Image (cartoon, rainbow, N blue to C red):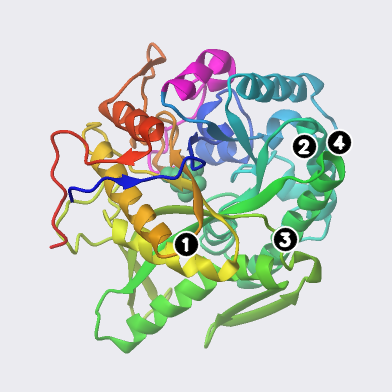
Amino acid sequence: MNEPLLFPPDFTFGVATAAYQVEGGIENDWSDWERAGKCKDPHARCGNSVEHWERFFDDVPLITRLGATAYRLSIEWARVEPERGRWEDEAWAGYRARLEALVKAGIRPVVTLLHFTHPKWFHVETPWHEPSSLVAWERFAKKCAELLQGLDVAVTTLNEPNVLLLGGYLGAAMPPGIADGRKAFAAMANMVRAHVIARQAILERCGPTEIGIAQNMLLFAPSRRWHPLDQALSRLADGNYNHAFLEALHTGVLRIQMPGFTAGKAVIDAAAKSTEFTGFNYYTRAHLRFSGKAPYVQFEFLDKLTRGLTDIGWEWYPEGFGQILRQLKRYDRPVWITENGLDDRTGLRRPQYLYEHWKELLLARADGVNVTSYLHWSLMDNFEWLEAWGPKFGLYRVDRKTMERQWTPACDYFREVATTRRLTAPPGTEQKPAA
Ligand code: FCB
């Protein structure tokens, strides 16, 4: 490709993190999960993480040095309400100071209210499948609205509710550790309501604000292309996992349909047209295989195109990014890439990954998908949930002994593209053939 592809002048380049994964010193449902030995390495602890809470003001220039003008970060509910009903005023003030520092540095905060983690009391006293969850949530959301008042920010109310529900309510793989379809659907409907509640609280306090969710979406494909059950599974996964929540925020109707397994419908009128943008987190393609015995679905990451999986074992598949982007036209909102990235332990593959995903993004734009923002996961290496400290998703490498943040070749490349808006291939790499 000789012609450079161009990003429009008002396109936003940014980076993303989540509180628990970077801040350090947090006690919540995940720290309990670790202590119960439920991460891949039962001894792994997030602990002081990469001390982003303490080092925040020194980390701000890391963002500006990338040429980034947006930073997606989250509020840790457990930090501000460690005991139910007791606010930690100092923590609220701490968040306010951090958000103000970003704005002052020319970085627009994209604030996530819930990025997987909860205060310890939440699942015990007011779990998502109970109506009481919304009472607790509304109090928190109103305080968040107060926190954001007067600042130019955007909001993702919920991060990947589908991952939280699949992992926490169907697979018992993350807190609250439940595997119960009925509770999962009740929790899902309440999370749709939670989005609406947070949106109302923010609009009331802050006036017009861009509000959405960050939705994880995978390109699903049948493991055996010819197999009707694998094909059916891929279609069901696409509908239920990728689109059900977004549909609910578009139409006001939440519908889960797994013929032969489960079905659910909830009408939540206030959810109709309840977003200003469609937030999309993209990482990979997943192949699905019908296994014949419970739990029937086998989930596989296959290196179909022999490009080499990313280090966490996910398929390198930028084409899926473009394909899903085109599907998002149906929601009739600007699309923000709220996460995209890879686990790259040598730090040598990220520029090429960025290049191939950005190219897909620009091709989708040329096809009429209104993508206006790209936030890379992640600003720096961090604690990767069940995988703990193995993966390295950061543009900046973090040495956890010294806590030094180290510039990588991907930082140069990110900066080059973000500041020139011209997409050219990174130096020293060839585009991989589409096999
Ligand atoms: C997403 C999560 C984010 C991070 C990336 C790798 O699903 O939202 O916190 O763990 O995966």
Q: CA distance from mark 2 to mark 4?
A: 14 Å
Q: Considering the numbered disc 2 on the image, is that residue within a helix, a strand or a loop?
A: helix
Quickly name the residue at label 4.
85
Q: Is residue 92 above or below residue 350?
A: above
The residue closer to the viewer here, 94 or 150, is: 150
Q: Earlier in the sequence, mark 2 or mark 3?
A: 2
Q: Earlier in the sequence, mark 2 or mark 1?
A: 2
Q: CA distance from mark 3 to mark 4?
A: 28 Å
Asked if disc 1 and disc 3 are in contact, CB closer than 8 Å, the reply is no
Q: Earlier in the sequence, mark 1 or mark 4?
A: 4
Q: Earlier in the sequence, mark 1 or mark 3?
A: 3
Q: CA distance from mark 2 to mark 3?
A: 18 Å
Asked if disc 2 and disc 1 are in contact, CB closer than 8 Å, the reply is no
Q: CA distance from mark 2 to mark 1?
A: 31 Å
**Mark 1 or 4, which is nearer the eye?**
1
Quickly name the residue at label 3.
274
Determine which quarter of the picture holds residue 410.
top left
Residue at image location 83% in from the left, 41% down from the top: 142
Q: Is residue 258 visible?
A: yes
Q: Considering the numbered disc 1 on the image, is that residue within a helix, a strand or a loop?
A: loop
